Amino acid sequence: MLQALSIRDFIIVESLDLEFESGFTALTGETGAGKSILIDALSLSLGARNDGAVTRVGCEKADISTTFDIQDNMQAQLWLADHEIEDTGSLILRRVIYADGRSRGFINGTSATVGQLKELGEFLIDIYSQNAHHSLLKTATQREILDAFAQTSELAKSVTVHFQHWSTLHQQRLSAEENAAEYAEELAELRDKVREIKQLGFDVDDWAALQQEHSRLSHGASLLQGVEACLALLGDAEPSSFALLGQVQHQLSDLIEFDSALQEALNTVDSAVIQLEETSRFLNRYLQRTELDPARLAEVESRIQMIHGMSRKYRIRPEELPEVLAQSQARMQTLESFADDGLLKQQEAQAWQ
């Protein structure tokens, strides 16, 4: 059901928004009032051919949108599903026509060709005018009328769904038979690919940890030297950080006798001393547990090279390996079902029943 019509800069119309209620609606007016302009705009939104300049004078483009309720329109719903366009129960068709004659179409916000607008429009509305093509001449419309008269519309919808399911299986079987050699070659390649990636045992979290470990091992000497230098500055250097802070503590303690406001500064220095002591203990523990390990470094580098080698082979990033594995396994399962001609015939026969 047509719910709304929106027009911007079309012929002589600057802006128009119409909303339609359910039931019968009549648009009336004197000759020349612009009734035909509304019909022309509606037709263009449904993919009609643009035979002339329709953009309002001085404007760059005309913009027409129509909104339909398709909750009870099975054919329109199936069309959207076949073209992978979201179905929200409300369908919005939009046509933008530029002053130079170019035009663009949209279906529920998705870019569409004028042909697609026209194809979908066949399921939405009939426009009758003098000497115009009548949908009664269409075989599909004749079937719809016959089904409605026989009160079998719901049955017809069910048959349509089941037939499309059977048709999909039928085409799969024919494709499997015609491309058996090609599918067999692809299946063999996929099996090798899946086997290689699975043997690699790649895990995204482990990969991040492996890179971190490599960074630590490859810079082991620099890390040890740097930590030792920090410890020296804290306690062994002349003057050391602890010694300097000790002097500050002593001076502030003496000065507080004259002005207690300095107590806050002394407290801050005391906290700094405690934090530096914690830092010193942490760095000492770090030195004790850190050592150069050339053997482990070689092992980690070998593992990283294997992962990068696999990634280069399939032209992906290492992080994409799990996704590629899942996609390959799914495709492999599909091809294996294609290889089972008996299973395909059985599924096709069951869908026909």
Image: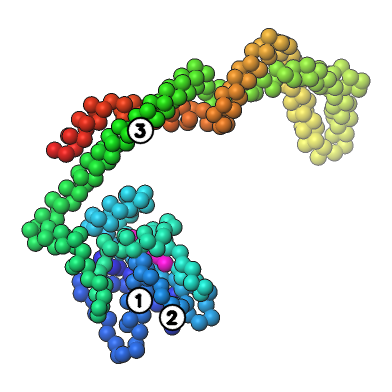
Q: Earlier in the sequence, mark 1 or mark 2?
A: 2
What's under tag 3, amino acid-wise?
Asn
- Range shown magenta: 91-95
Count neighbours of disc 1 (C-alpha within 10 A) and say few if under 14, some if 14 to 19, many if 20 or more: some
Q: Nearer the viewer, residue 134 or 278?
A: 134
* Residue 179's disc number: 3
In this view of the protein, can residue 268 be seen by the observer? yes
Query: If the image is split into quadrants, where does the C terminus sit?
Result: top left
Q: CA distance from mark 1 to mark 2?
A: 10 Å
Name the mark nearer the viewer: 1 or 3: 3
Q: Earlier in the sequence, mark 3 or mark 2?
A: 2
Between the C-alphas of marks 1 and 3, the distance is 48 Å
Instruction: Tell me the residue that label 1 is attached to.
Output: 40
Q: Amino acid at mark 2?
A: Ile
The verdict on residue 116 being magenta is no
In percent of width and height, residue 237 lies at 89, 19
The reply to whether callout 1 and callout 2 are in contact (CB within 8 Å) is: yes
Residue in the foreground of this view, choosing between 171 and 153: 171
SS type, badge 3: loop
Quarter of the image for residue 235 reads top right
Q: Position of residue 351 (x, y in %)?
A: 19, 37
Q: Which residue is mark 2?
A: 11
Name the mark nearer the viewer: 3 or 2.
3
Q: Is residue 92 magenta?
A: yes
Can residue 282 be seen in the rendering of this structure? Answer: no
Residue neighbourhood size for the residue with mark 2, other residues' Cα within 10 Å, grouped as few (<14), some (14–19), many (≥20): some
Q: Residue at x 60, y 23 (%)?
A: 309
Q: Which residue type carries mark 1?
A: Asp
